[in-house]
Amino acid sequence: MTFEEMQKIIEEMLSVQRELQESQLQHKERHLEFEERQAKLEERHLEFEERHLEFEERHLKLLERQENQRFVLDELIHKYGDLAENSIRQREILDRLIGYSLTNESDHLNLEEKLRALEARIKRVENQT
């Protein structure tokens, strides 16, 4: 084998080695890029989970507030419903008293007795609120 043939074989071997090294570098770079993308995806996933947990906490607080408001509204409806009924009854009594007074039919009523009953009802309503 001549020197030139040996040199050509060595050059081909070096060329193959260079190509192999370049291929390995490219593979390494792609692997690093993949790992970076993977790390970013994991980071995004963690951020998403944090946001999801925050959302769930806010949702639970909202549900709790709604339940509290519903309870308060139920109490108010109950209290003010009774007040409205009592107010209507008292208004009817007052209208009748005024009517009797205007028509001089007071002898049909014992005003003093009715006034005491009305005052007792007013006190009952005030005590309920």
Image (cartoon, helix red, strand yellow):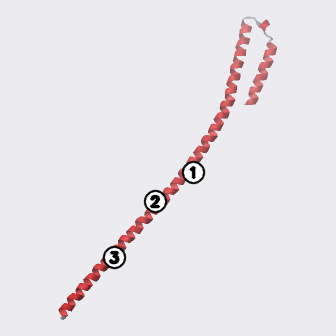
Q: Residues within 10 Å of mark 1 (few under 14, many from 20)?
A: few
The first of marks 3 and 1 along the sequence is 3
Q: Read off the residue under disc 2.
A: 44
2 relative to 85 in the view: left or right: left
Residue at (26, 85) in percent of width and height: 14
For the residue pair 57 and 3, the one nearer the viewer reads as 3
Numbered mark located on residue 25 in the image: 3
The amino acid type found where label 2 is placed reads Arg
Q: Residues within 10 Å of mark 3 (few under 14, many from 20)?
A: few
Determine whether 122 is above or below 16 in the image: above
Residue at (65, 38) in percent of width and height: 71
Label pair 2/3, CB-CB below 8 angstroms = no
Tell me the quarter of the image containing the C terminus: top right
Distance between the Cα atoms at labels 2 and 3?
28 Å
SS of the residue at dot 1?
A: helix
Residue 85 horizontal/vertical position (percent): 69, 23
Residue at (81, 14) in percent of width and height: 112
Distance between the Cα atoms at labels 3 and 1?
48 Å
Numbered mark located on residue 116 in the image: none
Residue 8 horizontal/vertical position (percent): 20, 88
100 relative to 74 in the view: left or right: right
Snapshot quadrant of residue 1: bottom left
The first of marks 2 and 3 along the sequence is 3
Residue 74 horizontal/vertical position (percent): 65, 34
For the residue pair 21 and 51, the one nearer the viewer reads as 21
Distance between the Cα atoms at labels 2 and 1?
20 Å
Residue at (21, 91) in percent of width and height: 6
Q: Read off the residue under disc 1.
A: 57
Could you tell me how many numbered marks the image carries?
3
The first of marks 2 and 1 along the sequence is 2
